[in-house]
Image (cartoon, grey):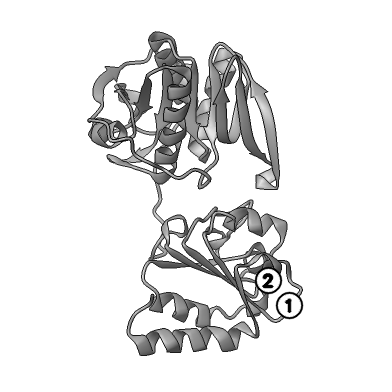
Amino acid sequence: MVLALVEHDNGEVDDTSLETLTLARDVAEQAGESLEAIAFGPEADGIAETVGAYGVAVLNTVDHADLDDYAPEAYGRAVVQCAEETGTEAIIAPGTDRGAETLSHAASKLDVTMAAEVTDVEVGDDYELTRQRWGGTLIEHARLSADTNLLTVAPNEISASESGGDAADVSAFTPELDDGDLRVQLTRVEESDIEGVPLAEARVVVGGGRGTDGDFSELEDLVEKIPNAALGSSRAAVNEGWRPHDDQIGQTGNKIAPEIYIAAGISGAVQHMVGCKGAENILAINTDPEAAIVQKADWAVVADLHEVAPAMSEELESRGHAD
């Protein structure tokens, strides 16, 4: 059996987990095994229909009073105990901060190697992996072999696809924990006071960098003219204090995968490209025709963003909508 860790927000499965289920289903099919999932927190049983559509036969919902909120070591122990009880040959988790942390604890308890940022798996005597290294700047082909193979799935690298299955059977699972497993726990969540579409969910992302000279007003106006759009920035803009860290796109910031990314006044350093490589299309606006972002973009406008962005806003406003 192959076990997939699924993350959800009160019964709504996140996109990275759907990508994880897609890869996990492929691994299970290659291995001739069934696919099961494990989920934590309130409303976990409410995702049975969603995960079933992605090929999950059984959804193991963790039933423990201390695990309604995140506790990394306890999550890792619960995953291990569920895997041992069900006879799992592989555990596959989303490549999110929480997924990677949970699986690293599981790997430690099982005393096995964990492979991170995987994009493809070929199952044979061993697992032949394709995975990202150094923030996606290096693609590695590796071999993984253990009694239980552990891996995380690189976000925004696999197209989530349903298999058309029925709702998964729900099985409550109660792990055995000790006090040490609960040394670190989530105690509260502070919601950001920034309104708008989250960067990771936006259909269109407009990003500004050092070329804005700290003036993001034209880019803010452009974002307001585009439905389901969000404003981001480069690390340089954050370091200058022009934008909050929540807006940063890059290796140490947000990873985005919009239909189009409009990069204005951004040079296109490797660290930034790691964050936006999931974009289907990139439009660069830059005064330097030799800028890295111009060379990597699908389209480029070599001009001052303070002239181009207002012109784009004016055109969208004249149409009355954004295409």
The percent coordinates of residue 219 (x first, y second) are: 51, 78
Q: Is residue 112 visible?
A: yes
Question: Which quarter of the rendering shows the C terminus?
Answer: bottom left
Residue tagged by mark 1? Answer: 289
Mark before the other along the chain sequence, 1 or 2: 1
140 displayed left or right of 92: right
Mark 2 lies on a secondary structure that is: helix
Residue contact between numbered discs 1 and 2, judged by CB atoms under 8 Å: yes
Residue 18 sits in which quadrant? Answer: top left
The percent coordinates of residue 23 (x first, y second) are: 47, 33
Calculate the distance from the C-alpha at mark 1 to the C-alpha at mark 2: 6 Å
Q: Callout 1: 10 Å neighbours few (<14), some, many (20+)?
A: some
12 displayed left or right of 222: left
Q: Callout 2: 10 Å neighbours few (<14), some, many (20+)?
A: many
86 displayed left or right of 295: left
Decide: is 278 above or below 314.
above
Decide: is 123 above or below 84.
below
The percent coordinates of residue 215 (x first, y second) are: 58, 81
The percent coordinates of residue 152 (x first, y second) are: 54, 32
Given residues 261 and 39, the one toward you in this image is 261
Mark 1 lies on a secondary structure that is: loop
Write the residue at 62% across / 69% down: 241
The disc label shown at residue 113, or none: none
Q: Can residue 184 be seen in this view?
A: no
Decide: is 222 above or below 172.
below
Given residues 203 and 224, the one toward you in this image is 203
Residue kind at label 1, given as amino acid type: Pro
The disc label shown at residue 294, or none: 2
Residue kind at label 2, given as amino acid type: Val
